[in-house]
Amino acid sequence: CLQNSEWLHLDQHMLKVHYPNIGVSEDCLYLNIYAPAHADAGSKLPVLVWFPGGAFKTGSASIFDGSALAAYEDVLVVVIQYRLGIFGFFTTWDQHAPGNWAFKDQVAALSWVQKNIEFFGGDPSSVTIFGESAGAISVSSLILSPMAEGLFHKAVMESGVAIIPYLKAHDYEKSEDLQVVAHFCGKNASDSEDLLRCLRTKSSKELLTLSQQEKAFPQVVDGAFFPNEPLDLLSQKAFKAIPSIIGVNSHECGFLLPMKEAPEILSGSNKSLALHLIQNILHIPPQYLHLVAKEYFHDKHSLTEIRDSLLDLLGDVFFVVPALITARYHRDAGAPVYFYEFRHRPQCFEDTKPAFVKADHADEVRFVFGGAFLKGDIVMFEGATEEEKLLSRKMMKYWATFARTGNPNGDNLPLWPAYNLTEQYLQLDLNMSLGQRLKEPRVEFWTSTIPLILSASDTLHSPLSFLIFLSLLQPFFFSCVPWEVIFP
């Protein structure tokens, strides 16, 4: 779909992936289907529908190859596309342009799967949706939407959930976004119909330029796709409880460091700089920054120790804690939940990423798709070791078994316990192991300590839950976004 095509080809060397040159077009609502060679109309195979990530600004079905997963695990893999940027998320915050167009594209794709996948050998009564990053946020959002009810039966969320804070716009941000469009059109921002008439006269190239100037917040409570705020839908159990896998990687923000815009972070950070960055990102009142410093930096002295703690903090706030809270809501609604932490740093990054980077954001995708076994033009896993190939086979088996039964266990795989009140989870690594209560002290800090103290402050006059606190944070995202967006 229309986007800055340079982003699609950025850093292929660093990420150790390769794919053909990809064109962009408004005519883009297509999907790719991968099926085992024997599949026919009566096969009734489980279906996995993949939602690509990319910050809702970039991404393509054409950079994923589902053939290995389909062939090894005897499933159908469907990779969809949805509109991006202004094309997928423009809203006037009223009935004239209610927004959520990309999410509605996803609903349309799932409706198509229900009507047609049987002809390709798939079972429309056994559809699992899965995605990573923005794709996982999409999966999490579809679970909450009445528009998508009945279109799928299981879900996998890899490094992303619907309650990540950047998704929701504050009132001042809504106004700023419309002012950008109004300035672009030379119109009054308060006249929604006039703005829409203007935009419909613009070329796709002009709209793409505008898309790079506005924030395009993905979540709009429009009464249709989102009948209420995602947090409220979760807390009120106003969603269909289905089996789910939810997980994070051990170093979600490790990818930030190679970015050229902030070379000073590569070699380390002092506490003063770290706290300045935190205040810019989290907007915590300055008088409470000492609490964050005490929690993350009190016993850290070297520049590299402080750098590592800063990255852990960002990963906790924007990935780990929201994922764990979402898992708890799903569990408490009566749905089977399986939680993982992916911990393996791929060997192929030895010459492209600093040694301190562990399991980076999106590193698990090449394992889930069986990238080491692909034979076509799309290279998703360059230079996999034999041990990594074995890990990939196990992860493919977990995902496919879950798609088949709603439970990832079986086929002599290491036990993956359900995420119940003991909060056990699987550590996905070359040597599998179980963990319990992932980052519990940090979860307690962000869900109890900080909200309670801020609630008691003179700046806030009502109780503040962690997730309301999250909604106050500075917008942040995690892939395909220039460093200066995060650290201005």
Image (spheres, helix red, strand yellow):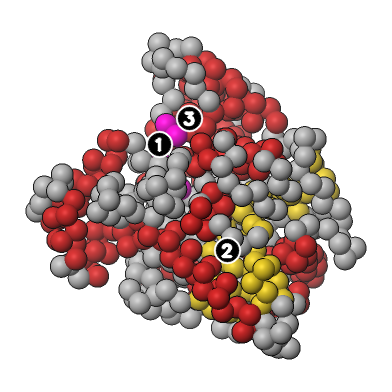
Q: Image quarter for residue 459? A: top left
Question: Which residue occupies the foreground of this view, 283 or 53?
Answer: 53
- The percent position of residue 338, horizontal first and vertical second, equals 74, 49
Three-letter residue code for mark 2 = Leu
Q: Image quarter for residue 351? A: bottom right
**Distance of mark 2 from mark 1, alpha carbons?**
34 Å
Q: Residues within 10 Å of mark 2 (few under 14, many from 20)?
A: many
Identify the magenta region. Answer: 471-477
Q: Which residue is mark 1?
A: 474
Label 2, secondary structure: give it: loop
Q: Residue at x 49, y 18 (%)?
A: 463
Three-letter residue code for mark 3 = Ile
Q: Residues within 10 Å of mark 3 (few under 14, many from 20)?
A: some
- The percent position of residue 221, horizontal first and vertical second, equals 39, 45
Eye-nearest disc, 2 or 1: 2
Q: Residue at x 64, y 30 (%)?
A: 442
